[in-house]
Amino acid sequence: MPKETLIAIGAGVLSAVSAMAFLIHLPGAFLFAYLASLPLFLVGFSLGPGKIAIGGAVGFMVAGMFGGAFSAGIYGLTQALPAWLAVRQLLLQRPSLPQPTSTQWYPAGDTLCWLAILAASVLTLAAVYVAYGDQGLSIQIAENLDIILKGLSPDMAIDSRGKMVALIAPLFPGAVGCSWLIMTIVNATLAQGILIRFEKNLRPSPAYVDLGLPQWMSWLLIASAALALLGTGEMEYTGRNLALVTAMPYFLLGLSVIHTWARRVSFTGMVLFSFYLVVVLSGWAAIGVAGIGMAEQWVGLRNRVSGINV
């Protein structure tokens, strides 16, 4: 068996074991679970999409051995499929015109949008599936959050637990989707950084300050926002969370605009530290950053900012 195939198989096993860290009670389970897709990205960005497909398939089977069909399905949706999709897209290339000797790589922003669409698709399918039962997605999530909080803190008063559920549940699916997107980006970035250090990368790293998004992504966000504003009940709940997920690429695009501006000032580190502190503490600030991302796509804020010296 070729060495590259053995490496891919090993990466799949390691990825699945990491993803099942809580189930098999590994020390440091949270860190292992968060970095579960890192071995797949390492294989994909160094050996290509074919090898990451092997690793993902092996990981799927190993996850099934540990936790059954449900765990295998969760692993496939949250680890194997997104890693394969990202690697496949990011390694697409074509000759760059008018200089065919250089290479034009698939844009990182487009890949980010496809990952957001994957998250939105899973959310939509979950809403449709649950809709065939007696309860909608919002009620199912609220009830499960109540059970989880009761298990984590049995002594919490019922009223306090109810208030916490009411606070978390309205945006919980969207928040999970955004967290998953960030987790995928972190693992992909770490893998690329490691491979560059050892000169094993297949493509150069895209510059974050040059991030761009396809025009069609804005229509998905607008459609999700319209569903949230015009829909009622479960339609409104689903639209609200879809809007959160589809806004995530624009949030990251807005961050790239902020980074472009910060590079123009002499106290870049302090500006970025203060900015991220505000974003962490204020949800409204995060909405504003996504708005900056939308404005960047429509009017080119970054080009205007790059011409200003502070």
Image (cartoon, rainbow, N blue to C red):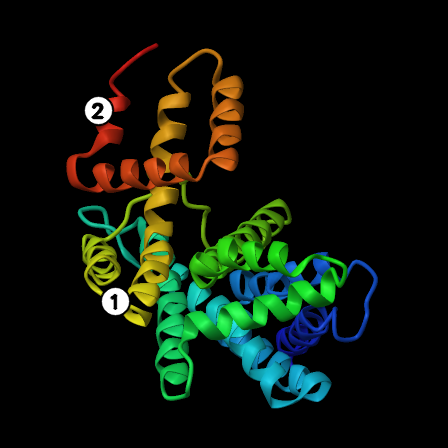
Element type where label 1 sits in the image: loop
Q: Position of residue 165 (x, y in %)?
A: 54, 59
Q: Earlier in the sequence, mark 2 or mark 1?
A: 1
- Look at 64% across and 64% down and name the residue there: 39
| Image position, residue 116 (x, y; %) | 37, 61
Residue at image point 47% right, 56% down: 175
> Which quadrant would residue 144 be assigned to in this image?
bottom right
The residue pinned by badge 1 equals 232
In the depicted view, which residue is nearer to us: 143 or 65?
A: 143
Q: Secondary structure at mark 2?
A: helix
User: Residue 124 at x, y = what percent?
Assistant: 35, 73
Please say whether residue 288 is visible from this viewpoint.
yes
Query: Relative to 193, is 170 on the left or the right?
Result: left
> In which quadrant is the C terminus drawn?
top left
- Cβ atoms at labels 2 and 1 below 8 Å apart: no
How far across and down, in percent of the image, does residue 166 sit?
50, 57
Q: Residues within 10 Å of mark 1 (few under 14, many from 20)?
A: few
- Looking at the figure, which quarter contains the N terminus? bottom right
Density class for disc 2 (Cα within 10 Å; few <14, some 14-19, many ≥20) is few
Question: Circle 2 is placed at which residue position?
Answer: 304
What's the amino acid at mark 1? Thr
Badge 2 amino acid: Arg
Residue at 33 percent of width and 36 percent of height: 288
10 to 221, vertically: above or below = below
Can you tell which quarter of the image residue 232 is in?
bottom left
Q: Could you tell me if residue 202 is visible in this image?
A: no
